[in-house]
Image (tube, rainbow, N blue to C red):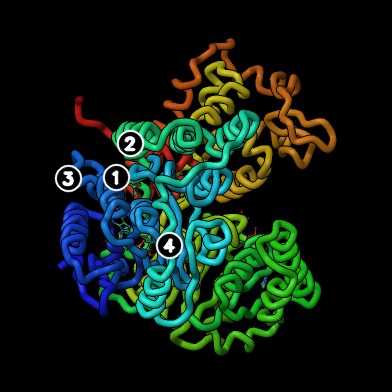
Amino acid sequence: MTASIARHGDIATVTIDNPPVNALGQALRQALWDAVAALDADPAVRAVVLLCAGRTFIAGADVSEFGKPPVEPHLPELVDRIEAAAKPWIAAIHGSALGGGFEIAMGCRFRVADQAASVGLPEVNLGIVPGASGTVRTPRLAGVAAAVELVTTGRPVKAARARAMGLIDAVVSGDLRAEALAFARQALARPLPPPVSQRAIAPVDAAFWAEQEAAVARRSKGAAAPLRALACLKMAAEASFAEALAHERATFLELRGSEQAAALRHVFFAERAALRPAHLKDAAALPLHRAGVVGGGTMGAGIAAALRDAGLPVVLIERDAEAVARGLANLQAILDGGVKRGKLTEDQAAARMAGVTATTDYAALADTDLVIEAVFEEIGVKRAVFAELGRTCRPDAVLATNTSYLDPRLIAEGLPNPGRFIGLHFFSPANVMKLLEIIPTPDTTPETLATGFALGRILGKIPVQAGICEGFIGNRILKRYRAAAEALVRQGVAIAEIDAAAREYGFAMGPFEAQDLGGLDIAFLQREGARAAGRQLPETLGDILVRAGRKGQKTGGGWYDYAPGERRPQPSSMVARLLAGHVQAAAPMDRAAIASQLVGEMAAEGDAILNQGIARQGSDIDLVKIHGYGFPRWRGGPMFATRKRPAP
Ligand code: 3HC
Ligand code: NAI
């Protein structure tokens, strides 16, 4: 039974029960359609409360149906049917009312929510626009400006704000069903407001739309859906309800079949699969109550901030008193940044700081469940740290390294109980970047591995398992990508053209500007280290620049020149001179071809990574590039973007 009816005097409840998230698949749409008919025909019923069982109100249309032809009853007609019911319907919302779920709620005469609930229209995150009147009813409820925010960002809003915006009628505490029934009784005692579709929209001027178009285009960086959603809202404000609804539906159906929507659905399901890996379903994660971090530099402070954001008390270990103070200052600077950007209040930042014990004394780690090492990238330093951790931590505590390139097996050598050792590779800034690469050694137990994934979930990260190789998944592909970009330069393609091609493809930055920002010296020093250890590595163009003192923005120039205090890259005649002997005559190349070459190389490395078992599945590689390296989400990642498609 997906929708069951019960009676409470002259008010009926319809309770939807379609786990896990009450998505509006065909069977549920039909059940709701039938419920409207049954209750319309029942003279004893004067109002209907719509509730959901389980963890949430309706989370939206069933995304897994999107690849298939639409089947009746269609959602827009169902929303209209509820609105046209002979008795007023009242949506009682807990959890999330999203997409089609919120559209159903807008078809109801009233919306009541509990305090923890949120509502939203996240369709643009799936490459589509709301397809069941979201762009047409929302401005009638909350005005055009609020509708633009809700629909073009896709971000849900919490109950209290939704109430202030006019999206819902009441926020209740206590038992939602009892409160919604009480609300229904009171509503029946007063004249009913008009159905949402019959309400007017306050007009806005042409300048408003021009401003919004510019802002949405800037924010969406190549993603098509937000601008199309804005166009639907403009139509809603300027045309009749029926015309706007028809335009919205046509846009929805067109985008639903688009490449961008397919890519975003791929990422949606890939993320969910990553969070709950099937191969670990029988492994119990260890409980995480207290964590330790060794090293309070760039990464250690960022990791400590991430742990504190998740509410875990943190012990931060540094090598001497001065470094302890520096580590605390690094963390304070991160929190201050959060306050400045309005993400944290002063009080929250102070509470984050108060939950940190910073010391040089490893004994303070005795009670931690997990310790993450983020000291210098030197095998000797790391091994000394783990020897100390092996002596002082609880035998069941998970011990993790944040190494970027060292072999975790060498770091773990000599540890008592190596089963609890693991690589946890964060990305900078560690409290912001979503990616967490999880690297087990052959000794790592399934429980330790499951604990790594559990940590990812607690921190709100996307955890991806990687095997051991130089650079794991992300940095290994980055290396190939940079080499491909350098190969194009050698062929005579202009540096600025390559960066422009990458940006046009959807990256926030091109490969060369990104290196100038991060510094060319890090990769250079790593290559020099490998050369010192006897490896034969050919000289890269980047090596030539670093040897000439060009390490990037911090030295006033790298691949580009920078005017003092400026971040705008200028083509450099010095770079042209330095590279002259290594670069062929200018050979212009189409930007789309440049991007396709770069992404093709990424995918080729991805294939090698898959064949060697370094990644478990192609979608994991896509997540790594999207969440760690700025690959455009709406392209689905390098593996998805270059997949072989069946012939049309
Ligand atoms: N369709 C199909 N399956 C869905 C789904 C949906 N809309 N939303 C979630 N699921 C599935 C997930 O894939 C997952 O499946 P699994 O257990 O097999 O991996 C399961 O439900 C649980 O999902 P989460 O792990 O994400 O559960 P959480 O409790 O962490 O989060 C949620 C719940 C906030 C509702 C979250 O699932 C979510 O944001 N879902 C997507 C909501 C959405 O995008 N809705 C709009 C759909 S488009 C639409 O409605 C078009 C309309 O305008 C016509
Ligand atoms: P960093 O130089 O900013 O910080 C290292 C910190 O470790 C310093 O504060 C230092 O005082 C401390 N330290 C050194 N020896 C110590 C010891 N014996 N005991 C306690 N503390 C000690 O370096 P960063 O950038 O934070 O890197 C740390 C680790 O994270 C490295 O392994 C690096 O490869 C890795 N990493 C770095 C990333 C980055 O973007 N910077 C990204 C991902 C991983």
Amino acid type indicated by mark 3: Glu
| Residue 624 at least partly seen | yes
Q: Depth check: give the residue in front, 255 or 266.
A: 255
Residue name at image x 39 percent, y 52 percent = 195
> Is there CB contact under 8 Å for labels 4 and 2?
no
Residue at which label 3 appears = 72
Sequence-earlier tag: 4 or 2:
4
The secondary structure type at the circle numbered 1 is helix
User: Label 4: few (<14), some or many (≥20) within 10 Å?
Assistant: few
Sequence-earlier tag: 1 or 4:
1
Residue name at image x 71 percent, y 38 percent = 552
Q: Depth check: give the residue in front, 256 or 372.
A: 256
Quarter the N terminus occupies: bottom left
User: Label 2: few (<14), some or many (≥20) within 10 Å?
Assistant: some
Amino acid type indicated by mark 2: Arg
Residue name at image x 34 percent, y 71 percent = 55
> Is there CB contact under 8 Å for labels 2 and 1?
yes
The secondary structure type at the circle numbered 3 is loop
Q: Which mark is residue 240?
A: none
Residue at which label 4 appears = 191
> Is there CB contact under 8 Å for labels 3 and 1?
no
Q: Report whether 79 appears left or right of 161.
A: left
Residue at which label 2 appears = 249
Sequence-earlier tag: 3 or 4:
3
The image quadrant of residue 404 is bottom right
Could you tell me how far apart the alpha carbons at marks 1 and 4 are, in whole angstroms?
26 Å
